[in-house]
Image: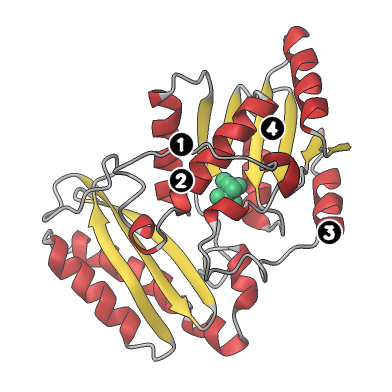
């Protein structure tokens, strides 16, 4: 396994692989890898011949008051995990290399980037779109793998690929949960023991929403209000949003007809956790 830090070196490697007819798979990450990342890597492995994992904590997707300074990292641990997964390359550029002096270009997936998390993290998805497009240009993958825990990110990158005619296939990987039901996330690291226990209310509330739908509930507002009530009965939880929305446009929906995304962001202490479930009218 190679660790590549220089952009031109990464591009050269990818060009050579492409010339040899190899299919390149990219798994973009911000490091501090967990089971969720490993499931992306294992899924990615099935879609190509060469596997590249990028490890880059992208400064442009963090707001001025957000957690970039404390974002957890442990590169030696990540390297060990990726070695065991038989990844071909870790691409680990510096911030300076990705955003050199004078950098000023932005790319924005407009409406999709302003709803859900985008409404509370202005500029976040612009930063994601920029870095993902840059990674695509540098690594030149045939396939890119994203997890569905950040469903909005998956939809935004899919839109970016389509709108800019990029020749890349997206692979979506389901949410990975710890045995107690909490969706795995690097930010779970911020949780105290008490907060972690409290955070189990998220999966519980989503599961209850699924049951209400099974029992015939179709009213979007009632479903989200019941989920909010369930979560706020947990004193350590601070709800940022709970929304029922269309699977593609991410627009809020009033009533559930076939399928919809129930997405939420909730704070527990310093940790802002996101989670979601797809609700189906016919279950
Ligand atoms: O999902 C993430 O970890 C990041 O948003 C990504 C896609 C690696 C871009 O920085």
Say which mark, if any, is on residue 172.
none
User: Label 1: which residue?
Assistant: 107
Q: What element carries label 3?
A: helix
Among numbered discs 3 and 4, the one appearing first in the sequence: 4
Q: Circles 2 and 1: CB distance less than 8 Å?
A: yes
User: Label 4: which residue?
Assistant: 45
Going by the image, does 212 lie left or right of 29? Answer: left
Q: How far apart are marks 1 and 3 (CA)?
A: 33 Å
Mark 3 is surrounded, within 10 Å at the Cα level, by few (under 14), some (14 to 19) or many (20 or more) other residues, namely few
Q: What element carries label 1?
A: loop
Residue 207's spot in the image, x, y percent?
A: 35, 67
Q: How far apart are marks 3 and 4 (CA)?
A: 20 Å
Give the residue drawn at x 77%, y 39%: 91
Foreground residue among 2 and 228: 2
Residue 243's spot in the image, x, y percent?
A: 26, 61
Q: Can residue 224 be spotted in the picture? A: yes
Give the residue drawn at x 86%, y 44%: 83
Q: How far apart are marks 2 and 4 (CA)?
A: 28 Å
Q: How far apart are marks 2 and 1 (CA)?
A: 6 Å
Foreground residue among 279 and 56: 56
User: Label 3: which residue?
Assistant: 77
User: Label 2: which residue?
Assistant: 126
Q: Is mark 2 on a helix, strand or loop?
A: helix
């Amino acid at each position: 396994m190679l660790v590549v830090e220089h952009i031109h070196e990464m591009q050269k490697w990818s060009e050579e692989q492409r010339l040899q007819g190899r299919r390149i798979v990219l798994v973009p990450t911000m490091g501090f890898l967990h089971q969720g990342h490993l499931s992306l890597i294992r899924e990615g492995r099935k879609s190509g011949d060469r596997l590249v994992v990028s490890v880059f904590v992208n400064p442009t997707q963090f707001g001025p008051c957000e957690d970039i300074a404390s974002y957890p990292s442990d590169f030696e641990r990540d390297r060990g995990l990726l070695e065991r997964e038989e990844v071909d390359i870790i691409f680990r550029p510096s911030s300076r290399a990705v955003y050199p002096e004078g950098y000023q270009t932005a790319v924005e997936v407009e409406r999709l980037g302003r709803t859900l998390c985008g409404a509370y993290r202005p500029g976040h998805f612009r930063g994601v779109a920029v870095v993902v497009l840059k990674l695509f240009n540098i690594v030149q993958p045939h396939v890119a793998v994203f997890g569905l825990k950040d469903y909005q990110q998956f939809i935004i990158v899919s839109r970016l690929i389509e709108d800019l005619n990029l020749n890349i296939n997206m692979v979506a990987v389901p949410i990975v949960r710890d045995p107690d039901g909490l969706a795995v996330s690097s930010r779970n690291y911020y949780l105290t023991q008490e907060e972690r226990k409290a955070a189990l209310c998220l999966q519980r509330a989503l599961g209850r929403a699924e049951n209400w739908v099974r029992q015939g509930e179709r009213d979007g507002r009632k479903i989200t209000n019941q989920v909010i009530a369930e979560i706020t009965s947990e004193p350590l939880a601070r709800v940022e949003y709970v929304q029922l929305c269309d699977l593609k446009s991410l627009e809020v929906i009033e009533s559930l007809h076939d399928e919809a995304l129930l997405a939420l962001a909730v704070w527990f202490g310093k940790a802002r956790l996101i989670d979601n479930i797809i609700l189906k009218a016919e279950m």
